Image (tube, helix red, strand yellow):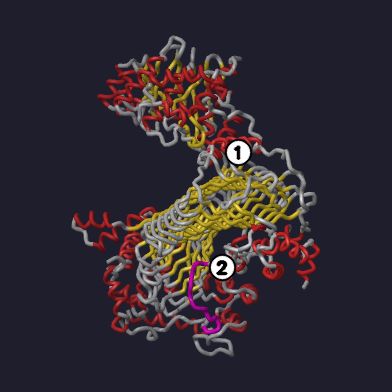
Amino acid sequence: MMLIIKDLHVSIGDKAILKGLNLSINPGEVHAIMGPNGSGKSTLANVLAGREDYQITQGSIEYQGLDLTRLSTDERALQGIFMSFQYPVEIPGVSNLYLLKSALNAQRKKQNLPEIDAMDFLNIVREVMKQLQIDETYLYRDVNTGFSGGEKKRNEILQLLLLKPSLCLLDETDSGLDIDALRIVADGINLIRDPKRSIIVITHYQRLLDHVVPDVVHILSAGKMVAEGDRSLVARLEAEGYEPFLEKKTAGAA
Amino acid sequence: MSTMVLHEDRGLDEKQVQKAALACPVWPLKQRLHAFQTWQTLPVPSVRDEAWKYTSLARFEKLALNPNKASTHRGPFKGFPFEIKSPAFYFINGRFAADLSSPLSDEIRILSQTLAPENVDLAQNSGYFESLNSALFSDGAVLELQKNRNEEDPIYLVFLHDADENLAMQHLRHHIRVKTNVHSACVLMDWNLNDIADFSTQIIDIDLEEKAELNCLHLRKPHRSGYHYTKTSAQLAAESKLIHFNLDFGAKLVRNELTVSLLGEKARCELNGLALALGHDHIDNHTQIRHLAAETHSQEHYRGIINDKAVNIFHGHILVAATAPQSNAEQHNKNILLSAQAEAYAQPQLEIYNKEVQCTHGATIGDLDEEALFYLRSRGLSDLISRQLLILGFAHNLLATIQNIPLQHVLETLIKAELALTFDFDTE
Amino acid sequence: MKTQNEALETLLAQDYEHGFVTEIESDTFEAGLNESVVRAISKKKNEPEFMLAWRLKAFEYWQSLKEPHWAHLHYPAIDYQALSYYSAPKTPGQGPKDLSEVDPKLIETYNKLGIPLKEQEWLAGVAVDAVFDSVSVATTFKAKLNEMGILFCSFSDAVQEHPELIQQYLGTVVPYTDNFFAALNAAVFSDGSFVYIPPGVRCPMELSTYFRINAKSTGQFERTLIIADKDAYVSYLEGCTAPQRDENQLHAAVVELVALDRAQIKYSTVQNWYPGDENGLGGIYNFVTKRGECRGPHSKISWTQVETGSAITWKYPSVILKGDHSVGEFYSVALTNHHQQADTGTKMVHLGEYSKSTVISKGISAGKAQNTYRGLVKIAASAKGARNYTQCDSLLMGTECGAHTFPYLESKNNTARVEHEASTSKISEDQLFYLAQRGIGTEDAVSMIVNGFCKAVMKTLPMEFAVEARKLLGLSLEGAIG
């Protein structure tokens, strides 16, 4: 198994957000997680990435046989977990190029590989940038600083393609993208679909899932998974909204 | 009278004033003695004075100060990392070192060798440190910049401190005038050569004539236990532009007062400042930008990196007079506190008397941005590296405004060494 | 009605029965300030010994002080010996007999604000039944509040009836040593309000001086003390939303708020003392010390002020955030027109861990007015994880006005975060043109834009207060653009 989450309870401060979430993902699978605002979708991604102000009060997360909760954020990243941020952070004064190189070298160091040669590195990056139709000047700009929403999201996918993680968490990567950018990003994601790699796509809308076809679709509501199905679930959701699923949940709870 | 005794106890008396007058006769002894008396009778600024609210001179007030001896040191200068190719003028222990310096010219003269006392107005500098400087200054540079010169090829003024006694004094005074339409650049450096605490004061007057531009970087790397006061006053005529960068490596006390008067229409200034306050450093930057004419513009970015038990103070006053419509002013002050005992004080101030203006200011004090830290760590960078990266990024943001790239690199290396940053930031 | 009127007269007359000390025989003290005046005030109010002792210490301290002049204000020197330090509540007949004796400009303003006739009379100081209506209203409320154990009375009554609470809390937030005006107030304050909310009680209504008869003519040196015990809640409204007739040139009030564990106090002010005329003549000098202390964990104190009055305003409602996770808020609109000068802001002193403060200040300058925000945010070494956010915006409307921002940020804890932002703006010709094109006249447009500018603050006011405050902003700006 790539990921096994059992009965996960998470709170921020006094507020419980995830309330007994279960999720299992096999290698090579693409799982879509959908749900209304405030249902806990982004919390799940952040908890998996290891954000410190989220407290796990109950439950377990097993990733490739490891107890994920024992690892720090950067250790998780080096173990192959990558989160594409819903709101990529601006880091003034630190160039994109530097971040990409440092991240790649941190990974290589973990694998006991020598630091990447500057020229080789540039060649790899240029290749990926071409795929994503990103201008090269962007390498020398500060991380996400002054980027448009679309540029930031493309930057996330660039890092994803470069770092080749085992488990990708795409947190509303489609928001803020126009049709063309969405296609480019989707193509990028499809490119890394691999029998050894799993992808969690968190989204509100059908449109990204038209391009990146999920194996399993989950509906998250009030901190719990309330429905699971194949891609037809997306169409049903699009037609009927979340309402029927939420009612089912209430009925179940009662 | 008790103050007189005290001053003599501290090693200051009229004999030294006489010596200074001999060394630099540009200013008559009588005026110097007057300044000395002023200094003796002036009350020492206290934390009850609004302008000295966060900076106490209580300790300094009791310290014995020593005269500076001539130094025969002619290099190599320990730790001095700059390879200077453009014209450079050296002062060691407050004395001009002709043998180390480029030849003097119409553009560059030395105060002690100048006969006509121009731009020298004693009454303008009547504060505590100013009057001490007026009494005791030993030399300085007089720049009358008439030729275009870009930022990559500035004039260097290097002030080396080679004290052989504790708190040996160095008092300098400079006049920089940029002629109409001339674009020029200069770099001022205070550099301590040995392990003895130094005390220095500097008074710098800058005059930009119409459409003149000056790019001026002032770097101070004194002894950690030293005391340093700098007052810079700039007057900008119509359509002139001043770009000023102030870089401070700390000391026991660093106090900088920078006043820029935008006197002519469309005059503009950009003031940048970076303070690295470590150990027991105390760095106090007071800036004032006076918008006095129409369509004047100012931008100010001051930042502090504060660690250990150090203190950083920023006091930035922006005045927009009723006579300055269509002006705008933008001021930013950011401080990062890296240790539990570090302290930061910020006073960004706007005083505005005209409605046809746009002014903003912002100030922050805090630790490194948690979100950015998380982002970097989620990309596999360790906590330590992520922190260092953010710190250097914070400094780099300002350093990037320096167009003299080799100089920018040297400064970045210096900063990394100062902050003990271990990684390589080279993005080549 | 007549019997009620008689009852009121009796009530008001009671004060006089206590008699005066021998050296001063009239119901208004002669001008001048010395120790015997302080003793006389205390004696007249029949105060217990601890009060007199406290007043005398304050007076002694005040004598050692000089009037502060650091604020961005200019006014002629105040002769403290030329003022009278005690003025008894007026008997009916002393004020204007009816509205025809009141300044027509004031009446005009009342009509614009839509204030009922009876209230107009009350506000203008006409001693008639309107006052009495308020008393009866107040009495009804009082009974209800008493049932819940809430104490809401005049400061003088509290000194007589609950001396233990006064002794426990008086001067613990604003000590008489705090500043020049606080020392003066402590020595000579005549009366004010007292509120105590017992543990766990949520005060069911907005408390207001409006409903308290003896709030009238409490004079220049008012003193208010509000205590919210553990888990209690109270919202307090100060002042009323119409310009008040007042002959006193100098006001030096003190307000102390104490919030114990998890308690919340919301204090709203609409201040509109006489600002002076368009030439800057007359008007009130308002030097107020307001401070709250979040003494217990998770307590919260929130100040909201809309300042449109006074010739001079010197006022910094502050919060001492002592309790862990305590919260301080300051929302302010300060509008100055003509020759008014305001130097106002706040102090947020963070001592407790994870204490949080928010400061939103909106300054509007018109005419020849000077408007200054002055604020201190202080993070003590103990304030781990503290947060402050401050936003100060100035709107300049006059050609000769000034808008100034003087914040002080001090931090001694690296886990804390302090953020300050300020900006200036003006009402643009484009905005006015756009609104004019939609059929909105200049004055309404200005009022609309100003209200929009102040929205973040206005929405924190209790509803009925906000409606009147909005009207008041419009009125204060009449003729500001044109």
Quadrant, the C terminus of chain C: bottom left
Disc 2 from disc 1: Cα separation: 82 Å
Instruction: Bin the neighbour count of mark 1 within 10 Å (Cα to Cα): few under 14, some 14-19, many 20 and up.
Output: few
Q: Is residue C80 magenta?
A: yes
Q: Is residue C50 magenta?
A: no
Q: Nearer the viewer, residue C362 or A118?
A: A118
- In this rendering, do the residues under marks 2 and 1 share a single chain? no
Residue farthest along the top direction in this orientation: A195
Question: Within 10 Å of the Cα at label 2, are there few (<14), some (14-19), or many (20+) other Cα atoms?
Answer: few
Dots 2, 1 in contact, CB < 8 A: no
Residue C347: x and y in percent read 53, 58
Q: Is residue A161 left or right of residue B217?
A: left
Which element carries disc 1, helix, strand or loop? loop
Q: Amino acid at mark 2?
A: His
Residue B357 in view, yes or no: yes
Residues shaded magenta: C71-82
Tell me what residue is drawn at x 38 percent, y 74 percent: C244
- In the structure shown, which secondary structural element does the residue marked by tag 2 occupy? loop
Q: Quadrant of residue C474?
A: bottom left
* Horizontal side of residue B247 vs A169, given as left or right: right
Residue under the image location 19 percent in, 54 percent down: C438
Q: Is residue C41 left or right of residue B95?
A: left
**Residue position for label 1:** B85
Q: Which mark is residue C162?
A: 2
Residue B256 lies left or right of residue C192; in this view the side is right
Query: Quadrant of the image for the N terminus of chain C?
Result: bottom left
